[in-house]
Image (spheres, rainbow, N blue to C red):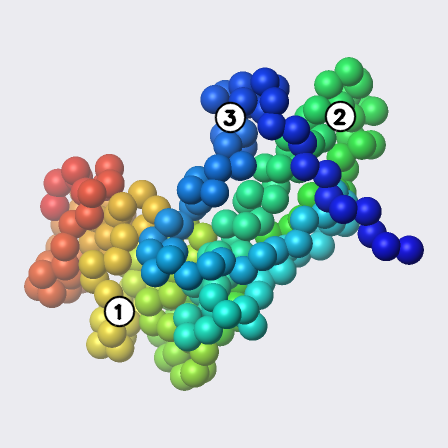
Amino acid sequence: MPRRPAEIPPDDEWSQEAAKTFWWGNWRDPSNCLFPWLYDDGRPRPRYPMKDDWGVQPFPVDYSSEWARGRPQWEVYLDAYDAWNRETCRLIELYRRKVEELDYEESVEVYEGKFPDVPEYPTANADVLVAAAEPDVVALADALEDPDSDVNCKDCGLWTPLMYAAFAGSIECVEYLVDNGANLHARNNLQDTAYDIAIQAFAKKQPDHPVLRFLREASAPRGAGWRSKLAE
């Protein structure tokens, strides 16, 4: 039996009010994406499935698409994460409409288990991020041996391994990452650099922390987020 197509809520007064009021309401606008820099080349994005009942399955990541060709795995993941966010917003609107006249218990029965889980982050890059955050320089070196790993990979908050290592205060991991090409200029989704993050973590109580000293001597830049306003 063919699966019924996903339901697209009508673009009406209800949806237009939701777009002005709720964080999830503007999902119809194709320009409203989490990582617009991913699409600067203008290449058509992959098409992802829509379902009204995902059964809490992870949202898919399409590594075989034309758009994914030549891109690092973590960028392909971020595209899927953006699509997951849009699909989640569609489902929120869909089920908000359906349960408006129901009480709480009845509402839960309607939407429980219907939403997709987040896409799975690529293992090779997850190992790098985890090793930097723990921090474990031996595990970090091992993880970077994987040909699919990337010293400048980013998670959905756009944190890099260097940012995690700087936050953890590991001079060993910070030095190792920089020696292997970590980008000192990279910014997270709040426009903070690794140096900003290290300053927040250590400048007040440990102004001579080795990570701060190393990044300062490396002429690490400040970003444009709130951490960039903190004194060195």
Label 3 SS: helix
- Does residue 28 appear in the picture of this structure? yes
Label 1 SS: loop
Q: Type of residue at label 1?
A: Ala
Asked if the residues shown at circle 2 and circle 1 are in contact, with their CB atoms under 8 angstroms apart, the answer is: no
Front disc: 2 or 1: 2
| Mark positioned earlier in the residue sequence (2 or 3) | 3
Name the residue tied to disc 1.
182
Q: Type of residue at label 2?
A: Lys
Front disc: 3 or 1: 3
Label 2 SS: helix
Q: Is residue 212 left or right of residue 95?
A: left
What's the residue at 34%, 71% (across, down)? 151
Q: Is residue 53 left or right of residue 203?
A: right
- Does residue 143 appear in the picture of this structure? no
| Mark positioned earlier in the residue sequence (2 or 1) | 2
Which percent across, then down, holds residue 115?
69, 43
Which percent across, then down, holds residue 143?
43, 77
Q: CA distance from mark 3 to mark 1?
A: 39 Å
**Rendering quarter of residue 134:** bottom left
What's the residue at 47%, 66% (across, down)? 67
- Residue 98, label in figure: 2
Q: CA distance from mark 2 to mark 1?
A: 48 Å
The N terminus sits in image quarter: bottom right
